[in-house]
């Protein structure tokens, strides 16, 4: 009987607070500027991947959320990740057998793989599923192959699958150093602070309905690189200083500074999208209205109590300190009410609102201008996810997404 | 009996194709960059102003669209225009009496004024009414005072009322040279080409419904100056080159180049608004959708057939050559249908659509992706105005907005 070589692991989503937009090398996925992100708890948002290697498999196969991706072999970015991890495995096998003299080293680097990966959130929601997915692929492979390498080394491989995936190799607060070498060997993720560094910092993700499919970030960013006359100025003259200031605000847990930088950098990223030709829009009227509500809230609070950031889609990610979260949920719920019968509108593991009927009905903050925006149609914000800063990838012992024959347990 | 000293004149609206955003001197209204605009026909959009000077008037009074503006004396920008024109009048009176030796020079510079001004379009529509209004005020005063000065000299005075008003002193294609002198004496408008230079160029103005009152341009631009880290780059490194290219594209009647520059500069202006902190939004979902439709239309046409530009509001101004206007009106009408009983949706002096029921029902351009955007709710675009390039201010003989007693004929 053939021994089963298999590992299962989970990886988190990350959302940038200093945005990555533009590649200086599209093959190696080398960014035009450094970036900083925060890794979210896997409780709400994670990718889980099982990878099995077997000499009996006739080819490498991939199932995403229960559906087989037939053209996997042709996907260059996936191939990058396979190639790099197999190369490290091969070196490791050679080292074990030749240098250390171990017999019977299992030649996993030569086996085909069956890969099954699922997200616990809808891919279409635009929540950086490629980041968690590629991070999970590379991390799970590294565990399967027992690679003796650091998370930072792995981040360079995950980067070649999806740029921002490199940041999901770490929990907590993470920077992606753009590097300067042509081969990309110094373009890697580093942890600024771990997930327990700033426990007061929490996150609200507002999932927003949108009629229009946005431009993919891969296409969009290179269009910006080619046509925007503002992006290079951002890259050369704005981001380097913000990287320092953001790192310091995180290390000092200075929410006021953190919030200002986060909002300004989100705005500037979307400004560069608008300066692209033809222009790229990710924010819609609901996104704009959330910005107006947060701006009024901060203004009347006399300090920054909430910081919005938007990626390549209309969803709002709001960072806030724990004590201000209920007030913000109430504000969002007032202006963007759920459907009457929507029980899933607010995902509330922290049991902040025992009576959900009170959502949006509590008093507004002092001096808040109630007419700052009109109340939006029901379901403009489809869901509010309440989450927190979380850990990096983890192995899941005794879990598997594959059955004995090496196929997904739940095929679609 | 006291002789009546009165003049009536009309002035046009102008819309910039290289945008003015930011002042280097807010008192003198000196811009941070030069700009270029097109003056529209007064048939659809004009300000009309009657000004009477009389020794019997006890104070200077102003009626705008039938309503008296009581605090006129305190409005610094209006006072700038009065002061500067009266100064020129006084010099002229002195010259007539002292140098040329004319007796009985009428001391108009010492008389109070009754001013009545009306727009033939709603002020709230966000169609640069302050530009046509201040241009009309200054031009009418210059005629009343019989000032021996050029339109460019007058443009420096109108500029001190409302920056972009200086461009409405000319018809056709107009540049506002930012100048470099501290006293503003070289910050003035010049005509690039007259209104009959490019008769094929026409204009569609799409009036767009918006729930939210936008930031005023006066406040907005200084907020951008203070907080955007991209605006200075635009001012120093982008606009100067675009001024040259746009001037050339107009002189050569090169619609393709004109369109590209117009759209890019509109996008960049709104990008700088978005990079302001807190961000300023003028485009809404309808504006964005119009951009998508025009982008698809140009894309499938293999050339630029339409050029959008947006000022400090959601309304779209579309420049196109005469032969493509029906196709564009049909496209806009398809995706942004009017209310069923709306007879005023499309203002059509050119009688392009004899049967208005066909609006939006004609075939789409070849290969046009019909699903590029969803069809918007009725009345998202409230009106389409079809107009053309027009002349500068004109005196209206035998017309007056004031009755014999010096009060508006139609008081509200």
Image: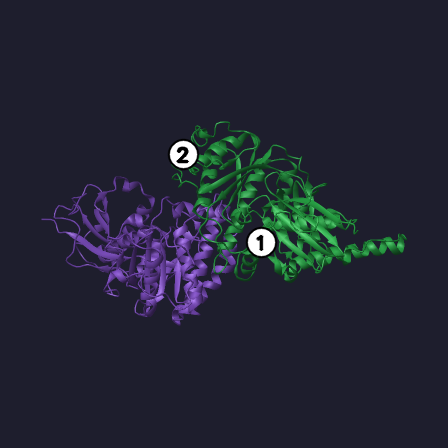
Chain colours: A green, B purple
Of all residues, the one furthest to the front in this rendering is: A1
- Left or right of residue A82: residue B67: left
- Callout 1: 10 Å neighbours few (<14), some, many (20+)? many
Q: How many marks?
A: 2
Q: Quadrant of the C terminus of chain B?
A: top left
Residue A395, position in %: x, y? Answer: 71, 43
Q: Nearer the viewer, residue A397 or A13?
A: A397
Q: Is residue A337 above or below residue B33?
A: above
- In what element is the residue under mark 2? loop
Q: Decide which of A171, A302 is in the foreground and name it.
A: A171
B125 or A244, nearer to the observer: B125
Dividing the picture into quadrants, the one containing residue B40 is: bottom left
Instruction: State which quadrant residue B289 falls in.
Output: bottom left
The residue located at (49%, 54%) in the rendering is A214
- Locate residue B398 relative to residue A406 in the image: left or right: left
Q: Chain of mark 2?
A: A
> In the drawing, does residue A185 fall left or right of residue A219?
right
Which residue sits furthest left? B1
Residue A87, how many percent across, how many down? 76, 58
Q: Quadrant of residue B33?
A: bottom left
Q: Are marks 2 and 1 on the same chain?
A: yes
Give the labeled residue for mark 2. A369
Any part of residue A125 in sight: yes
Tell which circle, 2 or 1, labels the residue nearer the N-terminal end: 1
Q: CA distance from mark 2 to mark 1?
A: 35 Å
Residue to which mark 1 is pinned: A21
Residue A403 percent across, percent down from the top left: 68, 48
Q: Chain of mark 1?
A: A
Q: Residues within 10 Å of mark 2 (few under 14, many from 20)?
A: few
């Amino acid at each position: 009987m053939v021994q089963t070589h298999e590992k299962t692991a989970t990886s988190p989503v990350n959302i940038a607070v200093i945005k990555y937009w533009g590649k200086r090398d599209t093959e190696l996925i080398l960014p035009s500027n450094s970036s900083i992100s925060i890794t979210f708890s896997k409780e709400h948002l994670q990718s889980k991947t099982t990878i099995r290697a077997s000499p009996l498999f006739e080819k490498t196969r991939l199932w995403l959320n229960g559906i087989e991706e037939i053209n996997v072999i042709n996907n260059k970015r996936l191939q990058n990740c396979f190639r790099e991890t197999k190369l490290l495995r091969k070196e490791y096998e050679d080292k074990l057998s030749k240098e250390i003299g171990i017999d019977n080293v299992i030649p996993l680097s030569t086996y085909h793989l069956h890969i099954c990966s699922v997200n616990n959130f809808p891919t279409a929601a635009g929540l950086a599923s490629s980041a968690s997915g590629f991070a999970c692929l590379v991390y799970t492979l590294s565990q399967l192959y027992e690679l003796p390498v650091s998370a930072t080394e792995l981040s360079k491989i995950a980067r070649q699958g999806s740029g921002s995936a490199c940041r999901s190799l770490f929990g907590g607060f993470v920077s992606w150093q753009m590097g300067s070498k042509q081969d990309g060997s110094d373009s890697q993720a580093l942890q600024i602070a771990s997930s327990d560094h700033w426990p007061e910092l929490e996150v609200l993700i507002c999932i927003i309905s949108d009629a229009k499919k946005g431009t993919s970030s891969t296409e969009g960013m290179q269009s910006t690189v080619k046509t925007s006359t503002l992006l290079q100025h951002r890259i050369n003259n704005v981001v380097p200083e913000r990287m320092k200031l953001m790192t310091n605000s995180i290390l000092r847990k200075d929410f006021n500074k953190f919030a200002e930088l986060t909002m300004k950098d989100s705005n500037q990223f979307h400004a560069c999208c608008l300066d692209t030709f033809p222009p790229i829009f990710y924010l819609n009227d609901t996104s704009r209205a959330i910005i107006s509500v947060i701006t009024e809230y901060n203004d009347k609070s006399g300090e920054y109590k909430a910081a919005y950031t938007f990626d390549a889609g209309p969803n709002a990610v709001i960072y806030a300190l724990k004590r201000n979260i209920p007030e913000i949920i109430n504000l969002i719920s007032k202006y963007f009410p759920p459907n009457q019968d929507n029980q899933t509108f607010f995902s509330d593991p922290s049991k902040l609102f025992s009576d959900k009927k009170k959502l949006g009905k509590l008093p507004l903050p002092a001096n808040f201008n109630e007419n700052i925006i009109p109340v939006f149609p029901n379901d403009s914000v489809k869901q509010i996810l309440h989450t927190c800063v979380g850990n990096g990838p983890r192995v899941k012992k005794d879990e598997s997404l594959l059955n004995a024959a090496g196929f997904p347990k739940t095929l679609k």
